Image (cartoon, helix red, strand yellow):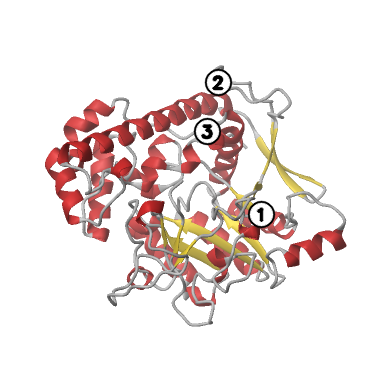
Amino acid sequence: MAAVTIKLERQSALTELDRALASLTRAELVGASRRRPARAPELGSAGADDSDTLRVASEALQKSHAQLEQMAWVRAVLQRALVGNQITPVLDGRQVWLELEHPLPSVPAWNPPPHQVSLRRFQLLSWTSKMGTPSFSLPAGATTMGGTCPGANAGQSVVPLATLRRAARKVTEQIGAPVHLAQAICQHCYAEGGQYSTATVQYAQLVRLAFVSEMLTSRTSQGDLTALFDYAVKNANYYLNGRRGASDDAERSHRRRGERDCRRYFRLHDSGDFFTPVYLAVWKTVANLNPDVSFWAPSRVWVNETLREAVNVVNGPAEHSNLVIRPSAFHINEPAPDPRALGVGWAAGATTYKDALKPAGPRVSAPDGRRPPYDWDCQAYDPENELASCREARAPDGRVGCRACWTYGTRSPEGGPGGLAINYTLH
């Protein structure tokens, strides 16, 4: 099986974007700050004067643009190293690995993987320490920079202008407002900076993407991919710390610290998104084959009509599905799409508000009778949560050990329909 390479197309200069993209003009930036709810000064708030609004928006955009450019360069180097390298799935005990025919070089020179890291075998699944769950991770970001997030094509400054404009028009049709890159969540994506930007993580994600892309090319190989994912999910490590230990003690701790319903939880796409309808259908089949596992995937593919409807076709009605697909807000400090407007396959949404702009308390109420921007504020980063983890966070029902992102996608803690829209504080 030959590794698939993804053509990288990106904008190389932010100055071109500053000149050409309508949503970054002075009039629209200032006008938007007056029309929209107040924002934090770092991201162009209405509380500052016009010049301050423009300055802080420009600074935030330049900083995030530099991060995205760095990621694009790392991927370009690593993808060249993958060309022509055969990828084969290998079972080692209960774990699934993707093994390359030839070890990869320790590149790039400015950000090489540690010497002790294997550059020939990569785990199919990963582990999210904050959530304490197994996960599946792909490259994040716009498809034009090797990412798997179609929604980012309208929200990242590295996207070529023609593509950016076309995608932004589609988003505007959905949200009824222009796209502003300085406020776009994709522009400030956590999965394209920090630990995610290291060569070690990027190699693993790119190998997974190359393997999955190849497997999606025929019905036979799609079935093989589904079977492989199914095996990996059934045999994944759902223990507290990602390592297997004494089963009795681990299981008691597991139930005591969050899994009180004795279900298993899987985080789908801590990085990346459903990049094609066929890929989405594969994961839906895997979810159907594992009814005892709850899958949660935040997604911004609602901006793409084809993918939005694909979610409705394969995942509806959402309240009867163990695959919780939450539509993510497009801009920082703005509500998520109403799932009722998106279709039957969508759960309640997800937002990203800066701490200074959030209503007080985790449970949000609207004193004026209007629908609040979200229903529950994720408590994983509460100052009293020393581990900053879901297993130590307070849940909407008041108990310690939270799985609200999975459990309350389509219903409330009281069992009512509709689900809880959840906010993840900008950090």
Residue toward you, 383 or 292: 383
Residue under circle 1? 132
The residues bearing labels 2 and 1 have C-alpha atoms spaced at a distance of 31 Å
Foreground residue, 100 or 268?
268
Q: Amino acid at mark 3?
A: Ser
Which structural element holds mark 2? loop
Q: Amino acid at mark 2?
A: Pro
> Which residue is the site of mark 2?
108
Residue at position x 38%, y 37% from top?
Answer: 144
Where residue 7 appears, as percent x and y from the top left, is 42, 32
Mark 1 Cα-neighbour bin, 10 Å: few <14, some 14–19, many ≥20 = many
Answer with mark 2 or mark 3, whichever residue precedes in sequence: 2
**Which residue lies under the disc numbered 3?**
197
- As helix, strand or loop, the secondary structure at mark 3 comes to helix
- Of badges 2 and 3, nearer the viewer stands 3
Q: Closer to the camera: disc 1 or disc 3?
A: 1
x 65%, y 36%: residue: 87
Secondary structure at numbered mark 1:
loop
Check contact, mark 2 vs mark 3: CB within 8 A. Answer: no
